[in-house]
Image (spheres, helix red, strand yellow):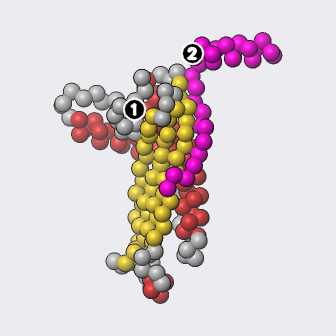
Amino acid sequence: MADENNAASNNDATGTDPVFAMQRVYLKDLSLEMPNAPQIFLEQETPNVEVSLNVGGERLADTVFEATVTVTITTKIGDKTLYLVEGTQAGIFEIANVPEEQFEPLIGIVCPTMLFPYLRANVADAINRTSLPPLHLAEVNFQALYEQRAQEAQSQAGGNGAPDSGSGIYVPPGTTRQ
């Protein structure tokens, strides 16, 4: 058993084994506004809810990356805003020795999938503290979102000779893996 551990340690030391690990999860930003309170509490209509979701990524060090999931929720009754919630959940991930074709899907699909439950809980808690009925964000298929944005980037690149790898969708230019 000790020999197996030493062999695994030696492989890690040479840097040949793929590494993917979440180092930290944190709430980077959370904002809740109720601009029409308390008068809006007297309204009897059903509120209209709009949800916008975005993901991002940034290189922090050679093998360390920050991934983010940002949500904006606007809830209105008629033309009056009941509440506006904006939140960004972030995580620090170590990614090393991963094949190039797997790198962006890790940042754009796997990392947001891991972060989203934390964001969901934080947003639900913030709304719950308003004394309004809770809002629970639906599950998100980050793979479908990633593929949709890759197609949009490819169609925007058009025939200008840009690569069609989806580069820059989740990892800003200049921060892609070397």
Q: Quadrant of the C terminus?
A: top left
Q: Position of residue 81 (x, y in %)?
A: 40, 75
Whether residue 139 can be seen here:
no
Q: Secondary structure at mark 2?
A: loop
In what element is the residue under mark 1? loop
Q: Position of residue 147 (x, y in %)?
A: 38, 39
**Looking at the image, is 19 positioned above or below residue 75?**
above
Quadrant for residue 160, please give it.
top left
Q: Is residue 5 magenta?
A: yes
Q: Is residue 21 visible?
A: yes
Q: Residue at x 81, y 16 (%)?
A: 1
| Residue at the disc numbered 1 | 175
Residue, x 23% and y 39% (percent of image)? 156
Q: Earlier in the sequence, mark 2 or mark 1?
A: 2
Q: Does the stretch in magenta take in 10?
A: yes
Point out residue 87 in the picture as x, y percentages from the top left corner: 48, 57
Whether 137 is drawn above or below 42: the answer is above
Of all residues, the one furthest to the left in this rendering is 159
Note whether 19 is above or below 126 in the view shown: above
Amino acid carrying label 2: it is: Thr
Q: Amino acid at mark 1?
A: Thr
Q: Is residue 78 above or below residue 121?
A: below
- Numbered range of the magenta stretch: 1-29
Residue 155 placed where, x, y %?
24, 38
Q: How many marks?
A: 2
**Residue shown at 34% from the left, 77% from the top:** 79
> Which residue is farthest front?
61
Q: Which mark is residue 16?
A: 2
Q: Residue at position x 55%, y 36% from top? A: 93
Alpha carbons under labels 2 and 1: distance apart: 22 Å
